[in-house]
């Protein structure tokens, strides 16, 4: 990353982390490895509290993280410039296109290239944010991006760092927040079939969802 952008990222990171500590009572996290996994890493979490969830998860990490964010946030030239400059990748959802076919080829390509460069990428795999405690069925995007990396560089291992966020009361000031983490590492030898097959995408998606279910208060 460019040194100037790194400086801005680190400054925003420190400011957001301080703001979260002021607003919430964040309890000690469970399951977070030290040192953090290196190499390509996909960071996942449940998503009950809109923009706050990604910041809570990433504030526990030391590595810079890119964000896969819904395309509706990129409307307007300034938002588009700012989010693209500061490590966000737009991804379309059905509600963003008015029923038109989704076009996420560029989002998947940028995500894949970032991971091939040993980057970390945050994805909210439920695909939407709802204020409820249960984990909704997750989408296949995270699995597909990981399998694309393994297809292009078969000797790689992709780490999924999965976080579960439990709020005592979502919007309340000084609400308690608990975060639990689990790690899943996947290489080609761990797959039940070729990385290009849809059955492998479904298998990996189920494996991710099962581990995430155990992290969230249902």
Image (cartoon, rainbow, N blue to C red):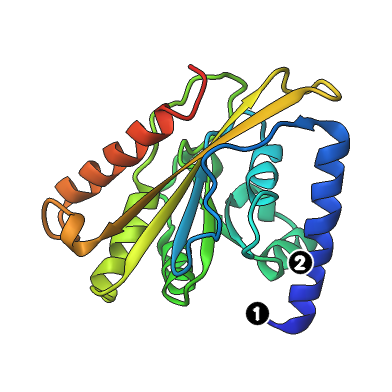
Element on which disc 1 rests:
loop
Q: Please give the count of numbered marks on the rendered protein.
A: 2
**Crowd tier of the residue under label 1, counting other residues whose Cα lies within 10 Å: few below 14, some 14–19, many 20 or above:** few
Q: In the visual, does 136 lie left or right of 144?
A: right
Give percent across and percent down for residue 140: 34, 45
Residue on which the image places disc 2: 9
Residue at the extreme bottom: 3
Marks 1 and 2, how far apart in space? 10 Å
> Looking at the image, which residue is at 59% across and 52% down?
71
> Looking at the image, which residue is at 42% across and 34% down?
212
Name which quarter of the figure residue 214 lies in: top left
Question: Tag 2 or tag 1, which sits nearer the N-term?
Answer: 1
| Circles 1 and 2 in contact, beta carbons < 8 Å | yes
Q: In the visual, does 114 lie left or right of 144?
A: right
Per the rendering, the mark at residue 1 is 1
Name which quarter of the figure residue 145 lies in: bottom left
Q: Nearer the viewer, residue 216 or 83?
A: 216
Give percent across and percent down for residue 184: 36, 49
Q: In the visual, does 190 lie left or right of 128?
A: left
Per the rendering, the mark at residue 79 is none
Above or below, comparing residue 39 to residue 92 in the picture: below
Above or below, comparing residue 77 to residue 142 in the picture: below
**Crowd tier of the residue under label 2, counting other residues whose Cα lies within 10 Å: few below 14, some 14–19, many 20 or above:** some
Give percent across and percent down for residue 114: 49, 71
Element on which disc 2 rests:
helix
Q: Nearer the viewer, residue 104 or 86?
A: 86
Q: Nearer the viewer, residue 26 or 216?
A: 26
Give percent across and percent down for residue 73: 68, 50
Q: Quadrant of the N terminus?
A: bottom right
> Looking at the image, which residue is at 47% across and 73% down?
118
């Amino acid at each position: 990353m460019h040194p100037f952008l790194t400086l801005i990222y680190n400054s925003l990171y420190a400011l957001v982390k301080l703001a979260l500590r002021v607003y919430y009572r964040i309890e000690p996290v469970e399951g977070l490895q030290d040192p953090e996994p290196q190499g390509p890493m996909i960071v996942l979490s449940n998503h009950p509290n809109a923009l706050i969830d990604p910041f809570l998860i990433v504030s526990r990490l030391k590595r810079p993280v890119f964000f896969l964010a819904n395309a509706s946030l990129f409307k307007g030239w300034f938002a588009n410039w700012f989010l693209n400059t500061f490590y966000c990748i737009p991804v379309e959802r059905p509600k963003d296109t008015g029923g038109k076919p989704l076009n996420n080829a560029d989002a998947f390509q940028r995500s894949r290239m970032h991971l091939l460069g040993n980057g970390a990428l945050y994805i909210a795999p439920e695909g939407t944010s709802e204020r409820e405690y249960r984990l909704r069925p997750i989408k296949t995007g995270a699995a597909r991006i990981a399998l694309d990396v393994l297809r292009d560089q078969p000797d790689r291992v992709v780490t999924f760092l999965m976080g579960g966020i439990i709020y005592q009361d979502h919007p309340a000031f000084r609400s308690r927040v608990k975060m639990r983490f689990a790690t899943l590492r996947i290489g080609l030898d761990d797959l039940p079939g070729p990385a290009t097959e849809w059955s492998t995408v479904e298998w990996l998606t189920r494996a991710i969802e099962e581990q995430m279910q155990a992290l969230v208060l249902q």
